């Protein structure tokens, strides 16, 4: 069979496929003024598939003017396609007891291919000293 | 013979077993999580939770409630306008905010002072007034801030795809100056095809 007639079709197909997956280019200040207070984190990966699509780059925290713990997590989509995911922050007091509040609600989000984005949350009370972030595939 | 009889009894009993194990199909799900139903035509409970959680976090992080002479601040809920095409109870939003603000320790909410003079708790208001009359002392604390806002619905359609955006807007106003000291907005957008539109 002569494959030549199929070549235009293959070319169109390749163009279509490349157009379906969009990735993100970024530009930022090379000499950053803001210094993030990064913290060492412990990760438990049970969904390796999600860990590739929505990977955790780093975690930093600060205190708000009102004395509440604020946490920011940088995520990176290592694939080339849009990924939907859910996340939830859980908060713990100085005794390690979980503090239940609205802040523990599940939030749906999305991250574009090769995009790096931040998610953050503020602790519900000044008594919260620790946190845990859960990422769930949508 | 015995085998045939046993098989007959089992096959007669099978439908009843299946019916007993099938159940009604109803089951519990966690309120506000990813398994909740998503509707285009109405605000779902997870939308209220997400909006309240987001805006409360921003309010607490701003420190606006800390800037009072006698902390904790006193917060009263003012008018929340419903600018959607549906009948909603704005308490689904404001109660969550009040609970979070109260739990944070940053502010106290009043249940004896409401819009138009109405009290959320008429009995508490009556007892407070009685107490003030008996002791000839004014114990009512004027709210330091009021929280007002609006919920707006925006719809869009492209061929079979429908999109609905709910915009939750809140303002925190200093009652002494009449100025807004904090403003917050959370938009939740949902998209679906015509077949996924729920009633």
Image (cartoon, coloured by chain):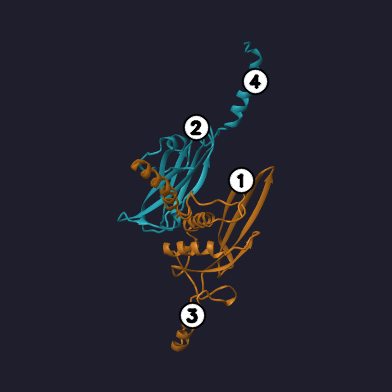
Q: Colour of chain B?
A: orange
Whether callout 1 and callout 4 share a subunit is answered no
Q: Chain of mark 4?
A: A
Q: Which SS class for mark 2?
A: loop
Q: Nearer the viewer, mark 4 or mark 2?
A: 4
Contact? badges 3 and 4 (CB < 8 Å) = no
Q: Which residue is mark 3?
A: B123
| CA neighbours of label 2 inside 10 A, class few (<14), some (14 to 19), many (20+) | some
- Letter of the chain shown cyan in the rendering: A
Q: Which SS class for mark 4?
A: helix
Q: Residue B163, percent across and down?
A: 64, 48
Mark pair 1, 2: CA separation? 25 Å
Q: Which residue is mark 2?
A: A79
Q: Chain of mark 1?
A: B
Whether callout 2 and callout 3 share a subunit is answered no
Whether callout 3 and callout 4 share a subunit is answered no
Most foreground residue, B167 or A74: B167
Q: Is residue A119 above or below residue B45?
A: above
| CA neighbours of label 4 inside 10 A, class few (<14), some (14 to 19), many (20+) | few
Q: Which SS class for mark 1?
A: strand
Most foreground residue, B131 or B8: B8
Q: Which residue is mark 1?
A: B192
The label number, if any, that marks residue A9 in the structure image: 4
Figure quadrant of residue B185: bottom right
Q: Nearer the viewer, mark 3 or mark 1?
A: 1
Mark pair 3, 4: CA separation? 77 Å
Most foreground residue, A108 or A59: A108
Whether callout 4 and callout 2 share a subunit is answered yes
The answer to which of marks 3 and 1 sits earlier in the sequence is 3
């Amino acid at each position: 069979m002569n494959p030549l007639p199929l070549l235009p079709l293959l070319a169109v197909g390749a163009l279509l496929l490349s157009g379906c997956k969009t990735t993100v280019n970024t530009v930022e200040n090379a000499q950053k003024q803001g210094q993030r207070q990064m913290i060492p984190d412990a990760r438990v990966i049970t969904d390796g598939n999600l860990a590739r699509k929505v990977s955790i780059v780093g975690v930093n925290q600060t205190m708000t003017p009102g004395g509440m713990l604020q946490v920011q997590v940088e995520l990176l989509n290592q694939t080339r396609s849009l990924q939907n995911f859910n996340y939830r922050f859980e908060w713990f007091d100085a005794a390690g007891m979980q503090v239940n509040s609205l802040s523990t609600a599940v939030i749906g989000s999305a991250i574009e291919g090769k995009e790096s984005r931040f998610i953050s949350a503020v602790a519900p009370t000044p008594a919260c000293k620790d946190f845990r972030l859960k990422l769930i595939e949508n | 013979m015995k085998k045939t009889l046993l098989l007959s009894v089992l096959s007669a009993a099978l439908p009843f077993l299946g019916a007993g194990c099938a159940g009604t199909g109803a089951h519990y799900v966690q309120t506000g999580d990813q398994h909740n139903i998503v509707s285009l035509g109405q605000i779902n409970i997870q939308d209220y939770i997400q909006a309240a959680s987001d805006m409360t976090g921003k309010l607490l992080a701003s420190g606006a409630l800390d800037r009072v002479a006698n902390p904790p601040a006193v917060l009263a809920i003012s008018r929340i306008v419903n600018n959607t095409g549906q009948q909603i109870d704005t308490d689904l939003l404001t109660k969550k905010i009040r609970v979070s603000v109260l739990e944070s320790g940053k502010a106290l909410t009043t249940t004896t002072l409401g819009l138009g003079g109405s009290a959320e708790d008429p009995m508490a208001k009556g007892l407070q007034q009685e107490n003030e009359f008996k002791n000839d002392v004014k114990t009512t604390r004027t709210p330091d801030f009021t929280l007002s806002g609006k919920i707006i619905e925006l719809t869009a359609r492209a061929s079979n795809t429908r999109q609905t955006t709910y915009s939750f807007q809140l303002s925190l106003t200093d009652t002494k100056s009449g100025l807004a000291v904090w403003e917050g907005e959370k938009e939740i957008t949902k998209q679906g095809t015509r077949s996924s539109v729920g009633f």
